[in-house]
């Protein structure tokens, strides 16, 4: 590819409804995306988008406004928005997509009621947080949608910020080459297509030409209209013994989604990889088996009959592909320049769209970014028309760009009331909104939102598989029938009682002359005790200890059950009730929860523990954060803490050190995420007495039948798996959020729950982790 050619984002034309891309694109797109992603991961210097939530607030509650903050940052990055205050998103520019799943009608209560059934959600997402109860329009809140923005078009101030401020010189619009070619009125898509004569003049491959004998036609011979679909195309080439040959192709659909991103191995010997332009290296290309003929075959399948290809110096791309396509828009010719010269893609991206592409700190160009940018430039031209382009005075901007101060979209979009829709529009993208027809919201009326209304959750799921790959930002909303208020209230009480009973242990028997003070001191060494009572109803005394945290109870069971104390072999066990029958399974699954996998619980920590830990930070590589809970009344630190590490291995090594002879602490792997601690603070202090219920045979049969058919547990398990399968189909580098908005009723509101992660996010294993640990005292050592 020529040094002056190509690079950047994605765009959408607002206000013009265009035919949707055929669903057959999706399967092929998924099959073709993975090889490049795989090779990119193999590069040791490759950066990947990564999340960190070590700076969570005390109660781990994230407001709807903070969610909006993250989503806007994910779209535009730090050049336009400050980083989110409640989490860290590293390498935002390496995000591929953003997908938000909303499970309408569900809350944090439902998640823990059906915790075992939601197996995929709890294991796949490391970052979980509490949401406040929902407002009147949860969707509008997280998108940042103001009433004035629901109409669809951007405010005029926003529209005017999409380009540089024009130099203050007089402009004779009638002499502008764009006006001379297209006139001053807006034009349709077909007017922007290159004619056959123009394609011949600019050396596009054409049927019947002598140098195109072996070229393959795309089989696109349908009738093109102003509503025909646009596809951005960009290719990277290397130099072989036979000249320039294809090494990478990217094809972007009109929704902004990349439907094809493929590495290609040339047929001839490579003499120069042209890495500074292509980004392709010998190591990247070595395992690739895809050939040019494979790409040609895939393109013939992907492109509909009336597809219009958009590119910058598109003739070079088509010649590298050795393909003939009749309908093209070339942005280097669309934005006409004086004396037959052409603007560089990098310049047009900055001057027209306010975007920086082909950055010098990157290794080569990004073909997908270039394809999106050309698509965006074409849509901008169609939306605003030749007169708007001429008023920008591109020629003067080109001559004086080094001395001119650009006026980017950042100035406008930093405003607090900017919505995610506006952010997407500023980079030429649309939002995909999938929902049931009965649940459509005000978001549906926005022209920058592609809304697809479905009849059922099942149809929403099916459409999501097809449409998500075509859009860089998607919201998928499932709706579930809420439980009755009375049933919800009863469920809330029973779950909190269950956690209380699971955190309670009975220990004994003890001798009647036992040292009760020593026994209490022993059981308190495992963690904070809510209450401790002596049970005298038995032949020999027992102790009933109710701990504040589940980890303490589990640690006491694991440490003392079957141990000889003061001459008696004691048993330490939980009360057996209908709510604790599955506690062993639940504890095991809690330990496997992705949020707990790298976190350890320690009991017996002193007031100087934090200082001692920082002095010995070289022993604990990978430490991300320490949580030191405080007593709400006295304000003093309690004698236990949680330490979060980047990996399970780092946590295990640290646990071995802390429980060794030097530190002499008691501990185990964590079981309860922080947001759960906050939720359980209102738990009842005493366990209710379990009642014995006998179910007569007819009712028992009915209960079993309901369990097989439509019991809520089955629904939770079913939809957890369905969403899991959809998640696995997302491309690597997708920021995914699962939001349970919470519920409102006459019996009170229930808080929601959020789960988030970046698909295939790899944990950092950099050797200087101790430096990050040393910085915990001012950043990540949060006290609650």
Image (cartoon, helix red, strand yellow):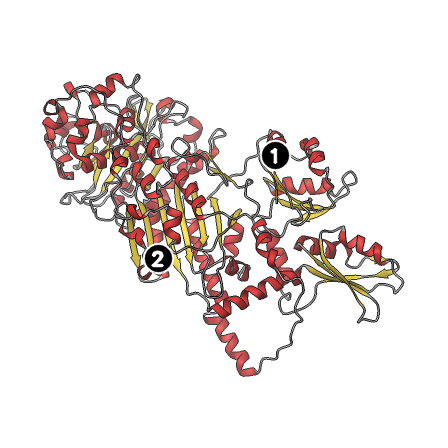
Q: Does label 1 or label 2 sit earlier along the sequence?
A: 2
Q: Quadrant of residue 319?
A: top left
User: Label 2: which residue?
Assistant: 460
Q: Quadrant of residue 161?
A: top left
Q: Residue 400: x and y, percent? A: 26, 17
Q: Residue 82: x and y, percent? A: 43, 34
Q: Nearer the viewer, residue 528 or 643?
A: 528
Q: Residue 207: x and y, percent? A: 14, 34
Q: Is residue 353 left or right of residue 287?
A: left
The residue depicted at 60 percent of the width and 47 percent of the height is: 597
Q: Is residue 757 left or right of residue 781?
A: left
User: Label 1: which residue?
Assistant: 776
Q: Which callout, 1 or 2, points to the residue nearer the camera?
A: 1
Element type at mark 1: helix
Can residue 637 be spotted in the picture? yes
Q: Nearer the viewer, residue 358 or 176?
A: 176
Q: Residue 637: x and y, percent? A: 69, 44
Can residue 375 be spotted in the picture? no
């Amino acid at each position: 590819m020529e040094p002056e050619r190509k690079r950047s984002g994605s765009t959408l034309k607002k206000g013009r409804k265009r035919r949707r891309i055929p669903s057959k694109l999706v399967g092929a797109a998924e099959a073709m995306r993975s090889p490049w992603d795989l090779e990119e991961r193999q590069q040791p210097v490759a950066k990947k988008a990564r999340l960190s939530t070590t700076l969570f607030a005390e109660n781990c509650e994230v407001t709807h406004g903070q969610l909006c903050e993250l989503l806007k940052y994910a779209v535009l990055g730090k050049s336009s928005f400050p980083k989110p205050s409640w989490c860290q998103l590293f390498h935002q520019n390496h995000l591929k997509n953003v997908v938000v799943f909303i499970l309408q009608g569900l809350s944090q209560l439902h998640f823990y009621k059906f915790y075992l059934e939601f197996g995929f959600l709890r294991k796949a997402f490391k970052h979980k947080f509490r949401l406040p109860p929902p407002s009147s329009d949860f969707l509008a809140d997280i998108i940042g949608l103001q009433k004035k923005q629901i109409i669809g078009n951007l405010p005029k101030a926003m529209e005017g910020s999409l380009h540089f401020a024009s130099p203050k010189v007089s402009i004779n619009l009638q002499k502008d080459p764009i006006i001379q070619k297209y006139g001053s009125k807006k034009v349709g898509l077909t007017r922007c297509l290159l004619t056959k004569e123009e394609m011949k003049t600019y050396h596009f491959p054409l049927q019947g030409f002598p140098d195109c004998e072996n070229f393959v036609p795309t089989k696109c011979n349908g009738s093109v209209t102003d509503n025909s679909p646009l596809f951005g195309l960009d290719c990277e080439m290397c130099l072989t013994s036979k000249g320039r040959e294809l090494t990478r192709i990217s094809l972007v659909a009109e929704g902004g989604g990349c439907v094809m991103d493929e590495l290609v191995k040339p047929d001839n010997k490579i003499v120069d990889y042209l890495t500074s332009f292509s980004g392709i290296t010998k190591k990247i290309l070595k395992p690739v088996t895809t050939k040019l003929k494979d790409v040609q075959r895939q393109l013939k399948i992907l492109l509909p009959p009336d597809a219009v290809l958009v590119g910058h110096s598109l003739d070079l791309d088509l010649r590298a592909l050795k393909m003939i396509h009749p309908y093209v828009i070339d942005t280097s010719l669309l934005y006409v320049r004086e004396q037959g010269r052409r603007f560089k893609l990098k310049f047009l991206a900055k001057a027209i769209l306010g975007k920086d592409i082909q950055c010098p700190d990157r290794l080569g160009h990004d073909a997908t970014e270039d394809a999106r940018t050309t698509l965006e430039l074409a849509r901008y031209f169609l939306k605003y028309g030749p007169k708007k382009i001429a008023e920008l005075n591109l020629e003067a901007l080109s001559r004086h760009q080094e001395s001119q101060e650009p006026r980017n979209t950042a100035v406008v979009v930093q405003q607090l009331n900017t919505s995610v829709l506006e952010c997407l529009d500023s980079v030429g993208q649309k939002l995909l909104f999938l929902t049931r027809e009965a649940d459509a919201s005000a978001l549906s009326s926005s022209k920058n939102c592609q809304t697809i209304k479905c009849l059922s959750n099942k149809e929403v799921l099916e459409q999501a598989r097809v449409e998500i790959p075509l859009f860089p930002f998607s919201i998928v909303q499932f709706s579930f029938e809420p439980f009755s208020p009375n049933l919800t209230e009863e469920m809330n009480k029973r779950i909190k009682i269950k956690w209380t009973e699971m955190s309670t242990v009975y220990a004994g028997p003890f001798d009647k002359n036992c040292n009760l003070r020593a026994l209490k001191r022993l059981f308190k060494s495992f963690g904070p005790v809510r209450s401790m009572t002596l049970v005298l109803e038995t032949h020999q005394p027992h102790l009933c200890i109710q701990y504040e945290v589940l980890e303490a109870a589990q640690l006491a069971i694991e440490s003392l059950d079957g141990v000889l104390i003061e001459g008696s072999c004691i048993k330490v066990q939980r009360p057996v009730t209908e709510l604790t029958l599955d506690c062993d399974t639940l504890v095991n699954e809690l330990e496997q929860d992705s949020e707990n996998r790298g976190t350890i619980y320690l009991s017996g920590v002193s007031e100087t523990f934090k200082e001692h830990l920082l002095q010995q930070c070289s022993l604990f590589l990978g430490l991300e954060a320490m949580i030191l809970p405080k007593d709400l009344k006295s304000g003093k630190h309690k004698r236990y803490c949680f330490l979060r590490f980047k990996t399970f291995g780092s946590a295990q090594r640290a646990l071995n050190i802390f429980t060794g002879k030097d530190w002499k602490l008691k501990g185990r792997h964590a079981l309860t995420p922080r947001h759960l601690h906050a939720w359980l603070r209102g738990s009842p202090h005493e366990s209710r007495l379990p009642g014995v219920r006998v179910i007569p045979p007819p009712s028992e049969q009915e209960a079993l039948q309901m369990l097989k058919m439509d019991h809520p547990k089955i629904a939770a398990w079913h939809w957890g798996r369905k969403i899991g399968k959809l998640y696995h189909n997302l491309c690597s580098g997708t920021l995914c959020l699962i939001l349970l908005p919470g519920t409102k009723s006459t019996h009170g509101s229930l808080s929601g729950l959020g789960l988030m992660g970046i698909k295939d996010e790899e944990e950092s294993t950099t050797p200087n982790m101790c430096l990050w640990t040393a910085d915990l005292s001012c950043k990540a050592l949060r006290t609650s």
